[in-house]
Amino acid sequence: MANEHILKVHGMHCESCERIISRTVEKHEGAKALSFDLKANTVKIQCDDAQLAKIKEELLSKGYQLLLPGEEAKEGYEAGSFSRIFSFLSNFISGSNGFAHENAMLFYAALTLVAILMLQAFLYIFAFRNIPNFLNIYGTLLFLASISIVAVMFSFFHARAFKERTSCMTGMMTGMSIGMMGGFLIGAFAGATSGMFVGSLVGMAFGMLLGFEAGRCCGVMGGMEGLMGGLMAGTMGAMLSVMMLSDHLMLFLFILTGIAIAILAGLSYMAYKEFGNLQKMPVSALQFAVYCIAIDLLVTAIFVFAPKSGLVWGG
């Protein structure tokens, strides 16, 4: 028999939390969240007594602390707490607590990256081996580009999985983030190999296309944010590489790639906080691999064969 229960939830502080908690409760047959009080940090739910323990366990896995009468709130459940982010990443990687689809996407990305690196090795042996100083000039840049393409496309497809439920604000943030990270990274790599002109064009094209596609789910504002993000970041990435050619460029690009991936991971966390877990796969393993490999081959051709202008990496 369904009864009403009032739970005191530490870590609940916004409408996004209300949606996450509602979905967690209502996936149990007959259970539902009746009301929320964000000031008092309480939620009233209706469920069978047998369901209550499971609901509490699932809310804990989502990063919320359920307080008993007289119990004090612990640190680590506040908005922006790193412990909540680490918990999300841990569940994401392990596939536990309802993260099966996210974990499968991560597996797709890992396999795709391995396939791309093997393809790059094949191309070197059979196509690029006779190009003087090829590995010294292009090796690191192609490696970083491969990682970046897989990371950006993972974030792109993960965000698109929620396009039908994306609010205007979230869509704008998604379009801008993916457009900027994609444009900045590819612009920086192309700028290093080919100079400011080609690097800017390639960075803009990649960033603007992905940013527009990621943001347009919420209308023209999201699409415009994606276009502007790709435009600015594509030119900035190329410019920074050209300016840093004689000042630890490769070290900077490793740092840049790591930070960009961290930002993209944050975008996935934002989507999780806003919409919860993936309910279905947004892309198949084959589709994901084909998109990434096609982009990587195009980028490789641009790096190697595009006209060089001004100073470039390797002289």
Image (tube, helix red, strand yellow):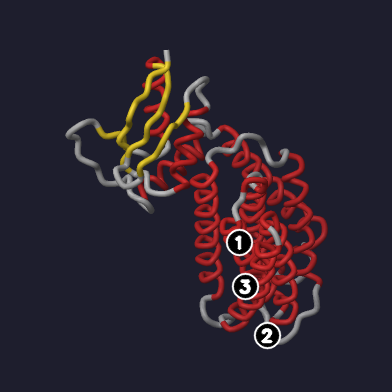
Whether residue 44 appears in this view of the structure is yes
**In the rendered view, would you say 128 is above or below 248?**
above
Cα distance in 3D space between marks 2 and 1 = 36 Å
Determine the CA span between mark 2 and mark 3: 20 Å
Q: Amino acid at mark 3?
A: Ala
Residue 63, compared with residue 96, is above or below; it is: below
Of badges 2 and 1, nearer the viewer stands 1
Tell me, yes or no, whether the two marked residues, 2 and 1, touch with CB atoms within 8 Å: no
Q: Give the amino acid type for the residue marked by disc 1 in the picture.
A: Met
Instruction: Please name the residue that numbered disc 3 is placed on.
Output: 233
x and y percentages locating residue 261 in the rendered image:
54, 57
Picture residue at 52% right of the left edge, 31% below the top? 98
The residue that appears at 75% across and 77% down in the rendered structure is 198
Numbered tag placed on residue 314 in the rendering: none
The residue positioned farthest toward the bottom in the image shown: 310
- Looking at the rendered structure, the secondary structure element under dot 2 is loop
Mark 3 to mark 1 CA distance (whole Å): 16 Å
Which residue occupies the foreground of this view, 126 or 217?
A: 217
Report which quarter residue 260 is drawn in: bottom right
Q: Quadrant of residue 9?
A: top left
Between disc 2 and disc 1, whose residue precedes? Answer: 1
Q: Which residue is mark 2?
A: 311
